[in-house]
Amino acid sequence: MHSSSSASFILLIQSMNPWSTESLDTVIQNFKAATKKLHYNVSFERQVREHNEREKIKEDREEDRRKDEQKLIAKLEHTKKRFLKTMPHIKYQDKHECYRAILSSGRPAPGQWLLRNQSYQFWRKCPTGTIDPALHLLWVSGKLGIGKTVLASVIINDLKSMESVETNIAVAYFYCERDQPSKINPLNILGTILYQLTSFLSANSQTMKTLYDEHILPATVSDLAVLLNIVLEGPGQRYIVIDALDECPDVALQQLLPVLVSLSRKALILVTTRPIAPLIEPAFQGSLRSTKVTVTDRDVNPDIKQYIQQCIVTAGQDQARHHIQNFGPVIKIKDLSLREEIIKTLTDNAEGMFLWVRLQVQHLSEQRTDHDIRTSLQELPGSLAATYIRSLDYIYHLDKKRQKRVQGIFQWLICASSPLNTELVRHAIAVDEMSDYWDPSMVVTSCNDLISDCAHLVEFTATPQSKDKDSKTMSTIQFVHTSVKDFLVNLSTKNSAPHLSLFAFRSLPSAHHTVFQSCFKHLSMLEKRAEGPDPCPELSEYIRGPNCLLHMYNADNGDNRELETLTRSFLAMLSMRTSPIPSVSHDNDKADIRGPTALHIAAGLYCSNVMGHLLTSSFGFSLTECDKFGRTPLHYAAGRLFKRLRVADNGYSCIRLLLEAKADVNAVDKDGRTALHYIAQLGVGHRFMQDRLHPESPIQLLLQKGANPNICDVQGETALHCASRCKWVDKHILQVLLANHGDPNIPNKNGETCLHVLMMNEMPDNDALKTLLDGGAKPDARDANGKTPLHILVEQSRFFRNLVQTVKVLLECPAGLDVNACDKEGMTPLHILARDKGPLYIRRRYPKGAASVANDILKLLLRHGADVSAQDLKGSTPYQIIEVIVKKDRIAAVVSSQDMSEQASIQAWASLPPSWEETEQSEPIYPFRSIPVGV
């Protein structure tokens, strides 16, 4: 349009001046050029504007895609964290961090010989795909005190250095400690290893998808083994290091060893033990024939010699610099020839025991002259036991007050299940010296002086305050080695040094009784304090928590001569406002700690001997007395109401005592529940290692004494209902109840049998389902809405692969099942599977894995005769419902095809398990979907 106007304008000028001059032509040419340039500029600006708009739209789309990706990843990370919380794990970094600080202190690192060892190098580089699993398992053994834990830390450091460089390597480790029950529990050991290995996985990895699909709740060792095998199936190299495996009790090893041997097919496993390991040797050296490295004196002597050299300072050396670099004792000498004498004497007598050398160096560092050092070298103890006796002899010659304080430290450390806070110990040992009121003047001023009086048997440590690896540490104290505790506990009055019987403990229950009495005394003093700050918050927190009651539990032993004193202290404690009883109850527990319920609480704490005293005529507590919820002591003993009291006790002794005292085994609380209901609802989640003294389970004991498994509570539910509703169903309980005439077909008030209840669980246990079906449970039972267990199962809209097997078990049960059974709305299971908001509908909002589960269930139903033309009360058939879904899917596929191609950069996998979703949020809608095109 503009070009035609310009041409018309030029023709007009020329027509008006036919005798155009040269200047006029120039003007016209300039006009044409200006017009052309103007048109170009306008066109260019338009193109730039359109380009910028397109780029802006593209950037906005990319930003939206990136935000969607970040939201999805954040969601997956949140889900992963919630999944990790379900794993039984404990603090595992503290000991390694302590040794790592020593190894990185600037001094030459010990144990380098092991890193160069041919067997270790071969194991370290061995690919996990190797056919022979024996190559994946390395067993490092060495005698007491030779430094196996240090070697384990050296190995972990070496493997961690590879992990920091190569992303396909993951390292998990665990230090077993016999004096800490939580660190020899097989659930904690395997759970902590699983926790570490899972932490390395990407939140949207295929392995995490598999873990969610299986959705196994880690309640038992076998569950953890399954999850570990899934994690180890992923790509990359996985290393597992377990130190001091032989410190686990036999009952724990019997569960651990088969799992470790099976895991060695997929991971490289290294364990350290002492040479004599009766259960470990046949497991590792039997058919498997694992590689074994035996640590000898010759191996560690160079490290010992190097350590001694670093601890000797001659006159003129910079001792301050020496202290900073070595963090250890210093032997100060003047005579240079004494240096070699010390090194040779200690090395020759060490017999490879690093611990022995360390204790001798500490002793020599206290000598003030070269003559004293030479004398001490001539009087060296020949063993660790002799070294400990020398330390006790030193303590014996302290004044009485200092001696008593050291005894107090020993007593607290022997009874502790973990390193103790320094401030806690400093104040705790002062409590016994006080009268009835807190006297701060009796608290030892210097912790260093207190530890020095222990003659090198106790040391300072740094312990993390929480499981978080970045958490702050607190100053703690512990024995220098677990062998010190063993020595003190086993010290006999018949020892070669009779005066050392002063340090002998009559028994562990007696030691726990003494510590409990100290706790009780501190509680009494806190009770009397009207105002002012707490003199020792660390001690008060310890006593008000479960630890005080753990000491009482461990003191509750028939060998304890002071059981009556223990019982009276317990009774007095119940009336205190500072009582620790609330610390072992969950906030939502209905544990009644008021009034005359001492017998209930003793039963809940599993203190059977205290209960025996309470039942005598002098105390006069009644077996039939109920708390405000109508519960008897038998309910407390059976129900684990104090869930935070983590003890390996199933209540057998308390239940037996109450039943022998003629407690009513079928007594009901206000909800109509018996002790059998209480014990059945625990499931496997609260079951610890089997009690070797009582192979019978508590539920068997109740049934033998006449417990009726078919008593219904106010909701109409039996013990079988309770057992089936558990998050972690205990199949043993189901078997015992069924074997004792438990009726699996009794309906509750909603008409639901235990099969209906089991199908309501987020992840029904297929073994439990088979147990109930074998026990006579009817798969066609109807609830109040006419639904069968199959209706309940398919309407839950869950997408875990295990559900396909659950449906298959129901459909193939010998009793037979009507796959076309209708509920009160006329719906068959196929209607429910296909209906609006059913699995086949909801799968459109989820990726392919979920659709596969729904399709597999659909195929199973059709294969077993499900009628696609059956009509519900509204006249709809499953075929019609599915046909509508297919049309919606195809329309959605066309609409979203372009967006899906742009967003294919993220791998989205199966749906997030509802158990780890935020309950207040609606179901997630992913930006990436696999759209099914048909059924």
Image (cartoon, rainbow, N blue to C red):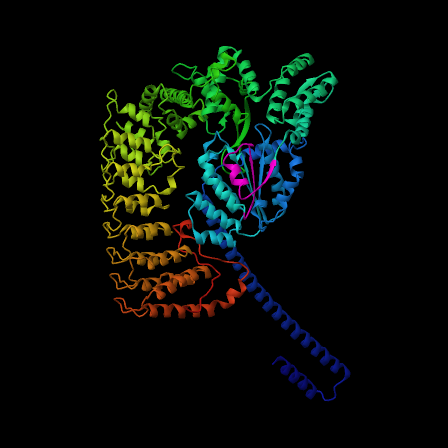
User: 195 or 348: which is nearer to us?
Assistant: 348
Q: Quadrant of residue 851?
A: bottom left
Q: Nearer the viewer, residue 225 or 92?
A: 225
Residue displayed at 50% across by 15% down: 495
Which percent across, then down, holds residue 198? Answer: 51, 47
Query: Which quadrant is the C terminus positioned in?
Result: bottom left
521 to the left or right of 699? right
x, y percentage for residue 225? 47, 46
The answer to whether residue 288 is above or below residue 869 is above
Question: x, y (%) of residue 343?
Answer: 69, 22
Residue at 63% x, 27% y is 352
Residue appearing at x 26%, y 43% in the figure: 740
Quadrant of the snapshot with the N terminus: bottom right
- Residue 288 lies in magenta, yes or no? yes
The answer to whether residue 228 shows anywhere in this view is: yes
Q: Is 234 contained in the magenta span? A: no
- Residue shown at the point (27%, 37%) measured from the top left: 702
* Residue 553 higher or lower than 446, as above or below: below
Query: Is residue 616 rendered to the left or right of residue 21?
Result: left
Is residue 847 something that shows in the picture? no
Q: Which span of residues is magenta-colored?
A: 265-293
Q: Position of residue 113 (x, y in %)?
A: 67, 35
Residue sticking out furthest to the right: 22
How many numbered callouts?
0
Q: Where 97 falls versus 884 (above or below)? A: above
Q: 381 or 195, which lies in front?
A: 381
The vertical placement of 211 against 498, above or below, is below
Left or right of 510 on screen, residue 197 = right
